[in-house]
Amino acid sequence: MRPDELLCPTPAGLCCPSGNFFVDPRRAVETALITHAHSDHARPGHGAVLATRETLDLMRLRYGENFAGRTQAVAYGETLTIGDVRVCFFPSGHVLGAAQILVEKAGLRIVASGDYKDVPDPTCTPFEPVRCHVFITEATFGLPVFRHGDAAAEVQKLVHSQNLFPERTHLVGAYTLGKAQRLIAMLRAAGHDAPIFLHGAMEAITGYYAGKMDLGDLRPVRDATKADLVGAIVLCPPSALGDRWTRRFSDPIACFASGWMRIRARARQRGIELPLVISDHCDWDGLLRVIPATGASEVWVTHGAEEALVHWCGTKGLRAKPLHLVGYGEEEEIEVLAASTEAATNTPAEGSGA
């Protein structure tokens, strides 16, 4: 069979007609296979959701107990048969519980990778290359300018800055799911044992992670005094860096942990004093490592710099095409909206110490 008969793009997302399911659908469907819990891939309202246990738990935290009609937890390496299609979940290394989904029928193997990275992350299972005929890859950082470098070295920049300016609060913007917890774990590995303070929007998901790994002393900002926050590291959603919420801190240093910080103009536009190039997506070099490792002869590219990666695949003799799926790769914007809502509805009055 042709690959586009097994998986095909539709307005609702990637559809498998033979199995009557979708992968990371953009709108409510009867059966959804979800790669990970970021809001641009995991939406509520489906009749049934199949995902890893961690992804299901994180979706409940984000959307409530009744986010789907029914759910089914799938372990890494577990094979399911849906209609006449076999599916299997493999680690993607993106965030806790994140998976690539292998869809197989009549000897044809397609891997929908969701989002992924192939560099170490102490908070999630490492990426596992999966042999396939067609590999569906993201291209969030699919341009040669995006070379992230060593994340541990970026964390050392934060530690060095804290030592250099012990009287100033380091206010670090980091995405609520995945990035914040990875940053905490890396700070602990770098020897930072002091309390780390959390914006209210960070608490539930970080608490879930902390139930599965040692993240050290974590405290909510709302319970801290101004004296507690002097010289402290405080994590918040990126949008909170520009919110009145920051007025409670004395002369804060605005930091932002993101692959986008490779572009210094972005850091300047956002008023970031200390940009930290730390990403939970593959950079250009990572994409070029992973694609050959799958053995795929055909590559479908989605959400990001699609054309550049399609061109590179062509130079390597691989068939490649952009999928032009919309509504993905927007986790940053969704986080901005969520955190802005949180700030507008839940942030106590200034001076309350919250």
Image (spheres, rainbow, N blue to C red):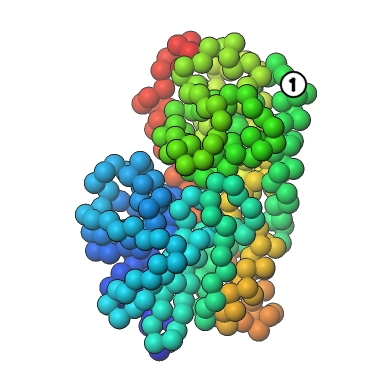
Kindly identify the residue that appears in the image at 45 percent across and 84 percent down.
108
Callout 1 amino acid: Phe
Q: Quadrant of residue 47?
A: bottom left
Kindly identify the residue that appears in the image at 53 percent across and 32 percent down.
236
Q: Nearer the viewer, residue 119 or 264?
A: 119
Residue 81 relative to residue 191: left or right: left
Q: Neighbour class for label 1 at 10 Å: few (<14), some, many (≥20)?
A: few
Q: In which quarter of the image is residue 251?
A: top right
- Tell me the residue that label 1 is attached to: 165
Residue 63 relative to residue 219: left or right: left
Q: Where is residue 297 in the image (x, y as percent from the top left)?
A: 58, 82
Circle 1: element type: loop
Q: In which quarter of the image is residue 119?
A: bottom right
Kindly identify the residue that appears in the image at 69 percent across and 56 percent down.
146
Q: Can residue 341 be seen in this view?
A: yes
Kindly identify the residue that appears in the image at 63 percent across and 16 percent down.
230
Q: Nearer the viewer, residue 247 or 31?
A: 31
Q: Position of residue 255 (x, y in %)?
A: 64, 33
Q: Nearer the viewer, residue 224 or 7?
A: 224
Q: Position of residue 330 (x, y in %)?
A: 48, 51
Q: Where is residue 16 in the image (x, y as percent from the top left)?
A: 34, 74
Quadrant that contains the N terminus: bottom left
Residue 353 relative to residue 26: left or right: right
Q: Can residue 268 be seen in this view?
A: no
**In the rendered image, the vertical position of residue 69 relative to residue 112, given as above or below:** above
